[in-house]
Structure formats: C-alpha cells, structure tokens
C-alpha cells in the first residue's frame, strides 16, 4: 500500500516461490519478483531479526523492492535463489542493511530454468539506490556472472548519491566473470570503509569454459563508477 509503514519483527520467511516463467507461460524472463517478500513504493518498511531463507524468484530471491525506504536489521538472508539479486534486490530506494548475515545465496540460472540470464548480485543487487550496508557479513554467495557478494549499478538518483559498505566481512563469494565480492558499474558511487574482503573469487567460468574471462576477484568497477576505498 502506498504511503504505508510496515514492520516485520522476529519473522521466519522460508521456502516460498514467486514462479519464474516456464515453457507454458513465457512473456518476460524476469516475471516472478520477491520469492520471500516483494514491496513497491511503500513509504517505509522495516525487517528486524527476521530469517529469510530458501526462497526462489526470477528477481530478488529473498526480497525484492522498488522505491520507498527499507530498513533490514539483524536479519539472516540465506539460501535464496534468483536470476538477479539472489538474496536481495532493490531499485531506486533509500535502504539500510545493518548487522545482517547474507550467506549462500545464488544469482543465475539453474538446471530447470528455461531462460539464459546473466546472473548478477548473488547476495545483494542494487539498482540506482542510496544504500548503506553496515556491520554485515556476506559469505559464500554466488553469481553466475557479476558481483558474487554485491552488484551495484547507477546512476544513483536519491539521497546523497552514494552506496556505502562499512565494517563488513566479505569472504568466500564467487562470480563467474567479475567482482567476486563486489561489482560496481554504470556511474554508481560506492564508498567502501573498514571492510575485510578475503578469499573471494572471479572464477572466469562465465562465457569461457577455460576460465579466461575473470576480472576482479575482490572488487571490479567499470563504466564510469566512482569508487572510494
């Protein structure tokens, strides 16, 4: 509902599906938003101490939103799957992600899918967002192509025109082409402060079985981003 304020506290959101297109109904490969939760232009929404796990969608396996202001604090986002934004997908929103565990999420194509999609943002996918990721762990997330842990692209159009990643641990994340931990693209501004990036990997498996396409095992930036470390 537009102009609403919604709170989810101590919730378990598990094993839900926003179905991807299949061979019988296929007008758009990106149909199926927010396997666990989807919200659109809600003024303010908060998630506190929630477990969001094992959900499936085309866009935003755990959660998908556009517009408004989202606050996600002390939550576990684990084991979710989507083409883009395996754990979380947000667009044109002011967002706080704080003290969260984002682990074992997957962005890409599974064996039963009928589409060939470039998997981006295993843990988090952010499109033109004013977003702060603070005191969080992103561990063992996978993207078929870009941004195993986080994929951000711009331009950011709200707030202070920057995405921030602060006091975070990112380890064991993998991307098939670029940005094992973080991929920043298309005029987005990203500030990374006091973070530990360890044992992330751009495997080179996307588009080349010989592994010759890997760029940025930890961080990848391209197409005019402003990246501050």
Image: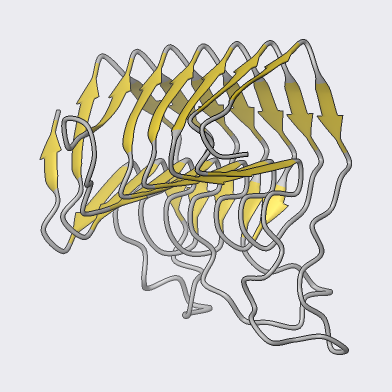
| Location of residue 60 with respect to 130 vertically, above or below | below
Q: Quadrant of the C terminus?
A: top left
Residue 12, by quadrant, is top right
Q: Residue at x 51, y 32 (%)?
A: 3
| Location of residue 3 with respect to 135 vertically, above or below | below
Q: Residue at x 21, y 60 (%)?
A: 186
| Location of residue 14 with respect to 18 vertically, above or below | above
Asked whether 179 or 201 is in front, the reply is 179
Q: Is residue 156 left or right of residue 105?
A: left
Q: Residue at x 51, y 71 (%)?
A: 118
Q: Position of residue 7 (x, y in %)?
A: 66, 17
Q: Position of residue 99 (x, y in %)?
A: 52, 11
Q: Is residue 224 left or right of residue 86?
A: left
Q: Residue at x 80, y 73 (%)?
A: 111
Q: Is residue 68 left or right of residue 140?
A: left
| Location of residue 134 with respect to 183 vertically, above or below | above
Q: Is residue 140 left or right of residue 15?
A: left
| Colouring method of the image | secondary structure
Asked whether 159 or 110 is in front, the reply is 159
């Amino acid at each position: 509902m537009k102009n609403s304020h919604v709170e989810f506290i101590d919730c378990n959101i598990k094993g839900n599906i926003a179905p991807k297109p299949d061979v019988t109904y296929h007008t758009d490969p990106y149909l199926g938003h927010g396997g666990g939760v989807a919200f659109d232009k809600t003024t303010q929404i908060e998630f506190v101490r929630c477990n969001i796990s094992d959900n499936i969608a085309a866009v935003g396996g755990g959660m998908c939103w556009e517009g408004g202001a989202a606050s996600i604090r002390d939550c576990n986002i684990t084991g979710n799957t989507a083409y883009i934004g395996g754990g979380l997908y947000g667009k044109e929103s002011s967002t706080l992600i704080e003290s969260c565990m984002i682990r074992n999420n997957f962005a890409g194509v599974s064996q039963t899918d009928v589409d060939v999609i470039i998997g981006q943002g295993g843990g988090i996918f952010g499109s033109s967002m004013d977003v702060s990721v603070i005191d969080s762990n992103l561990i063992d997330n996978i993207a078929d192509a870009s941004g195993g842990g986080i994929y951000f692209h711009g331009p950011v159009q709200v707030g202070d025109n920057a995405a921030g990643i602060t006091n975070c641990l990112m380890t064991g994340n993998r991307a098939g082409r670029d940005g094992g931990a973080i991929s920043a693209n298309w005029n987005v501004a990203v500030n990374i402060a006091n973070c530990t990036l360890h044992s992330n990997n751009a495997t080179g498996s996307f588009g080349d079985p010989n592994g010759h396409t890997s760029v940025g095992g930890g961080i990848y930036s391209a197409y005019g981003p402003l990246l501050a470390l």
